[in-house]
Image (cartoon, rainbow, N blue to C red):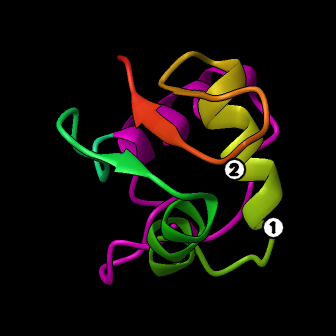
């Protein structure tokens, strides 16, 4: 994973291999608490702290599609489920 995440705890780039993508999203999901309901803005702040390649929407969508986060239909609240 060290080629994907730097010493500052940031994802360097979005990997090509599906297994690496899954590993990165699993790692990123651990930055969120099970006890908190987050706004989209709060989700974006946390994601931005942990990547440097500039695609916050991609990472947010992947967290939801890989079932690490769930959200209200209107996107107003997110929470960790896995």
Location of residue 10 with respect to 20 vertically, above or below = below
Q: Nearer the viewer, residue 74 or 24?
A: 74
Q: Give yes or no for residue 18 being in the magenta stretch.
A: yes
Which x, y percent locates residue 80? 37, 30
Q: Which residue is mark 2?
A: 59
Location of residue 6 with respect to 40 vertically, above or below = below
Give the residues in magenta: 1-29
Query: Residue at horizontal 48%, vertical 68%?
Result: 42
The numbered mark at residue 31 is none
Q: Which residue is mark 1?
A: 55
Residue 16 lies in what quarter of the image? top right
Which x, y percent locates residue 76? 65, 48
Q: Give yes or no for residue 16 being in the magenta stretch.
A: yes
Which x, y percent locates residue 40? 62, 59
Query: Residue at horizontal 30%, vertical 79%?
Result: 7
Query: Residue at horizontal 52%, vertical 60%?
Result: 43
Horizontal side, residue 30 vs residue 49: left or right: left
Query: Residue at horizontal 69%, vertical 50%?
Result: 59
Location of residue 67 with respect to 3 vertically, above or below = above
Task: Assess disc 2: are there few (<14), some (14-19) or many (≥20) residues with their C-alpha within 10 Å of its C-alpha.
Answer: many
Horizontal side, residue 10 vs residue 71: left or right: left
Residue 70 lies in what quarter of the image? top right
- Contact (Cβ within 8 Å) of mark 1 with mark 2: yes
Which x, y percent locates residue 81? 37, 18
The secondary element bearing badge 1 is classed as loop
């Amino acid at each position: 994973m060290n080629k994907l995440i730097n010493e500052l705890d940031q994802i360097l780039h979005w990997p090509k291999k599906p297994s690496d993508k899954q590993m990165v999203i699993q790692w990123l999901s651990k930055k969120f608490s099970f006890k908190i309901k987050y706004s989209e803005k709060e989700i974006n702040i946390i994601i931005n702290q942990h990547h440097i390649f500039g695609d916050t929407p991609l990472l947010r969508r992947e967290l939801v599609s890989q079932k690490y986060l769930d959200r209200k239909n209107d996107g107003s609240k997110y929470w960790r489920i896995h």
